[in-house]
Amino acid sequence: MDIPLELSGNFMELRSDHFHSGLDFKTLGREGLNVKAVGDGWVSRIKISPWGYGKAVYIDHPNGTTSVYGHLKELKGAIAKATLDAQYKARDYSIDITPEAGALPVKAGEVIALSGNTGGSTAPHLHFEIRRTSDQHALDPEAYGIDLPDTTPPLLLGLRIEALEPNSRVAPYPLKAKGLALQKLDSTYTLKTGTEAKALGAIALSLNAIDKYDNSGNSCGIRSIELWVDGVPTFSCHLDEIDFGLQRFCNAYMEYDLFKRNDLNYNRCYRLPNNKLAVYGPEAAQGRIVLASGEQRAVRFRVTDANGNVSILRFTLVGATATEAAAWSVPTEQGELFSYKNENTLQRPGLRFNLGPNALYQYERITYTTRPAPAKALTPLHIVHDPLVPLHIAGELAVEVSKPPARTDKLLLVKVADNGAVSAQGGHYANGWVTSKVKSFGAYTVMLDTIAPKITPLDLKADMKGRKTFGLKVADDLSGLDQWSGTLDGEWILLEFEPKSKTLRHTFDDRSNAPGKHTFKLEVNDDRGNRNSYTTTFTR
């Protein structure tokens, strides 16, 4: 870009359900900045979607890497033409095409697009990646010449001790804190004065660590962690690349509940049983520490960021006496034991929940309760365990509808948040039950959606001469917009869907720009097949 590079997020930063696979560059809080190719090459993929990376361009380079540019507002030149042609051919806004090698060549510094806020982006920025072309693993862009000022070592913000076995005991954290506080003395971190790390039995450690760059206040991710106990290498992880097929194991790498509920970046310095990430070192212990009564173990952490800045943490682990450990409260185990290795089924009156093998990261005791039906619901609220426990593979949830309505095709499963907000989960009805795949534990019920999406024109006028675009807001009250089709004088035209603003927008092109009077028609369906249409005429 034509501005100084400033990060809002870095490579392998912790995110919900994934590691961040690239660098997020700030764009002065606005859209429309020039985005330039980082090197000579050819466009190998163009993907357009309302979700994910939004409008994204992939460029293969002769050195065996692929650069990726995401959340773009507008594509340029031959790339834009190839995209528009493909969309009209498919009669679909969403496309994923792979042009032949060399068909769309680009030069280093060539403007390929304008920055934007499309897809899953929550604010204007450019998402940039470097991948290894052969396997499409994401690599650290900073290792390929992206120069970002960084003399700041990682910040170490807290330490947790985790019990690995039922008879292990960990001293409670002071004042209901989420971990043990740390302090920096000279160049080394240690436990805050007056704080003691005390436990008994088989334990492991988690470290709250973030990084910051010199010209950005945003919290970013670290690159590696190494752990020694009494001078013996006990654990290490190196976050240098990521296989997209393993991305969701990020939930097992971090303390998921603390990340989701408290926005804390605790890195587990041990491996959960069903964690298949290839980021861990060869240490035999894999983070497991056995602490005997009265024993003292010297612990040293070395945490490194992407630019080689290092922070050290030193402290002593103290083995508690049996008397001390007996006084520490232990959570009462409740619920049905599910194995991460096998298929598991929870069956209760009005509910069936099935998880396949490898859906969990460790053994879990699954709890279940019900509450009365919330407003507009047709069944009680079924609370299946805790949404702060992550699922790796979606489960199948079936809820019984004791008095099904006549239009059973309009039934759907919904998830209800603590604040009462509902999110559609889809599903199908058969033999008195609504069944759907769900990606998380939580509170679920069944609702009926018979209301069609609402269409509101935003800037469509009778006289559209000189105008470049027009838009319509399409809002659905429950199941969500599923399909849309716009025609001009009976011919399909491209409408871009922006889910954040719930708008469909057409930009006049050579297929829709003819002068004269035109008839525009929009037809929309929601996920339950409820339909609406809007027709108007205008003059160009």
Image (cartoon, rainbow, N blue to C red):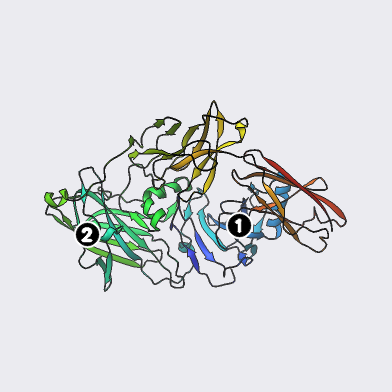
Q: Give x and y (percent) for residue 69.
A: 57, 58
Q: Which residue is mark 2?
A: 299
Mark 2 packing: few (<14 Cα in 10 Å), some, or many (20+)? Answer: some
Q: Compared to 94, does 149 lie above or below? A: below
Label 2 is placed on what type of residue? Answer: Val
At a point 47% along the width and 45% down the height, the residue shown is 245
- Image quadrant containing the N terminus: bottom right
Label 1 is placed on what type of residue? Answer: Thr
| Residue situated in front as seen by the camera: 522 or 315 | 522
At a point 47% along the width and 37% down the height, the residue shown is 380
Q: Which residue is mark 1?
A: 118
| Residue situated in front as seen by the camera: 40 or 474 | 474
Identify the mark nearer the N-term, 2 or 1: 1
Q: Give x and y (percent) for residue 402.
A: 51, 29
| Residue situated in front as seen by the camera: 169 or 476 | 476
Q: Give x and y (percent) for residue 471.
A: 72, 56
